[in-house]
Image: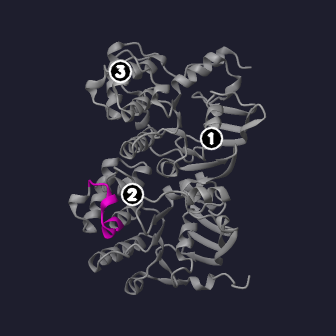
Amino acid sequence: MMTQSDSVSPYPEPANGRGENANPPLQQAQGKGLPAFDEDKPLLSASGVSKFYGSRIGCEDVSIDIWPGEVLAVVGESGSGKTTLLNCISTRLMPTTGTVTYRMRDGHIRDLYRMGEAERRFLMRTDWGFVHQNPADGLRMTVSAGANVGERLMATGARHYGDIRATAGDWLGRVEIAEDRIDDQPRAFSGGMRQRLQIARNLVTGPRLVFMDEPTGGLDVSVQARLLDLLRGLVTDLGLAVVVVTHDLAVARLLSHRMVVMKDGRVIETGLTDRVLDDPRAPYTQLLVSSILQA
Amino acid sequence: MAVPLIVSGVSKSFTMHLRGGVRIPVVDAVHFSIETGQCAVLSGPSGVGKSSILKMLYGNYAVDVGQILIRHNGTLIDLARAEPRQVMAVRRDTIGYVSQFLRAVPRVSALDVAAEPLVQRGADPDTARRRAADLFARLNLPEKLWDLPPATFSGGEQQRVNIARGFITDHPILLLDEPTASLDAANRAVVVAMIGEKKADGVALLGIFHDADLREAVADRIIEVTGFAPQKAA
C-alpha cells in the first residue's frame, strides 16, 4: 500500500492574481507543440481486466494502453461491455480481476485500485474528466452554469471568486455558450448546450485524461456535428488523452486515432481507426462496418 | 541515390466473412522501391490493386505478409508490422498522402483542412493557414470558398483542397492516388509543376495517374502492377 505522503497534489499553489490562473488549460496547450504520439510511456494501462456480474460477463481479459494526446474509441453494440470497461478503467467500477495503473503528474505509476479513496477522488476531480451521455448525470442541474464550471476549479484549489467566475465565463465561451447565460441553471438549457456545459465543467481543470460515454448520443445530427467539431478542436488544442465509448462508427472515425472493437465482453479487434474501418478483419467488425447507413 | 521506401514480398487479400469467408486475393509478392527526387508511377488496369498498394503503404490497409521498410526519423521501420502509434508518427513526419476523395469533416473550413498536417507537426496555425492560402491561390480555388467547409464543394474543388493538404508539408515520401482525376488542363499543369518542385526538393513520390499525358509528364519510372497479380489457380 502507498502511504498518504506519496500523494502530492499535482497542482501548484493556487495563483491569487487574476492573470496568472485565468486559464490553466490554455497555458498547458501553448506549452505543447506536437501531439505526443512518440512519448514512450502510456498514461493509463489496463491489464487483464475482467468484470463478472455473478456468472454473467461484463468484460473479460481486456488489456489496453492509453498514451498522452491520443483518442481511443471503444466501439461495439449495446451489451458488448464497452461501458463496463470504461467504468472499470476509470475507477467507477471495481474489476473482478486485473490491474489498472496510471502515470501521475509526478511521473509515478500507481495502481488505481490500491490508492486511498480520497486520493482517487482527487484524481477524478482534477486530472481526469468524465463526460456522461446524459448531461444531467455529470452536471448539477439546480446550480448556475458558472457554478457548475467553477466548482471543479475550486477542487484544484482556486478560491478567488473573481478568478473563478472569469475562468468559468471563458470556458462557456470556448464551448460556445453565450456569456450572459452564466447565471442560468442547466435546466434551462437545450440538450446540446447541456452537453457543451458538461464538457466545459470537465475541461476547466486542465485534465490529462478524459473518459466519454456516448458523448453525442441522443443529440440531433446538426447539434452532434457542432459538438464533434468542438470536441475535435479542444482535444487537439489541449493535447488531451481521451477514451470515448460509442456505438457510432462515424463518431469514432471523426474523433479517434485508435479503435478497440468489443463483442460479448471481449476485445476482438484493435488498430488505427481508419485501418479498422477501411479494412476490417474480424467477422463482427466487418458486420458493424457494413451496417453503417450511407447518408 | 537514397531509397526511403522498400516494399518486399507484400501480399494482400480480403477475407469476406459475411460471404461465407471467401478469400479475395488482391496482390501477391509486391516488390519495388522508390528513390528520393523521383516520381514512380503504379500502372495497370482498374482493379489490379494499385490503390490497395498505396493504402498499405499508408497503413490504411493491413498487410498479410511481407515488409514495407521506411526510413522514419533516422531509423528503419517495417510499416507492415508497426504499432498504430508508430504509423501515426510516420504519417505525421514521413509519409504524406493525397487520397482520391476528400473525407470532409463537418464545420471545418477548407483552409483549416489543408493546414491541418502542418499544425499537427507543431506549426503556428496562422502560418499554416497562410501556406494553405498560397497553395489554394496557386491551384485557382476561388477565394470565396476558402473559409467554407468543403463538404458542399464540387469534385474538382474538393480535390484541390486535398492536393493542398498533401503538398503543404515537407514529408520525404508523398503518395498520390489519382490527384488530378477531376481537374481541368490548367490545374493539371499546376499539379505537374508542383510535383516537379517536390522532386527537386528530394521528395520520393509514388502515384497513380490514369491520364496518360500527365503520367508522361511526371513519371521517372513505371511500376507495372499486373506483375503482382495473384496466381489464379492458387
Let me know if marks 2 and 1 both belong to one chain.
Answer: no
- Which residue in the protein does label 1 denote? A82
In this image, A151 relative to A263: left or right?
left
Q: Report which quarter residue B86 is drawn in.
A: bottom right
- Residue B73 visible, this orientation: no
Pointer 1 indicates a residue of which chain?
Answer: A
Observer-nearest residue: B40 or B16? B16
Point out the stretch of residues depicted in magenta: B147-159
Residue under the image location 38 percent in, 22 percent down = A21
Let me know if marks 1 and 3 both belong to one chain.
Answer: yes
C-alpha distance separating marks 3 and 2: 36 Å
Q: Secondary structure at mark 2?
A: loop
Residue under the image location 69 percent in, 71 percent down = B22
State the quadrant of the C terminus of chain B. Answer: bottom right
- Which residue in the protein does label 2 denote? B104
Tag 2 near tag 1, CB within 8 Å: no
In this image, A169 relative to A3: left or right?
left
C-alpha distance separating marks 1 and 3: 32 Å
Let me know if marks 3 and 2 both belong to one chain.
Answer: no
Q: Report which quarter residue A22 is drawn in.
A: top left
Graded by Cα atoms within 10 Å as few (under 14), some (14 to 19) or many (20 or more), the crowding at tag 3 reads some
Graded by Cα atoms within 10 Å as few (under 14), some (14 to 19) or many (20 or more), the crowding at tag 1 reads many
Q: Position of residue B42 (x, y in %)?
A: 51, 80
Give the foreground label among 3 and 2: 3
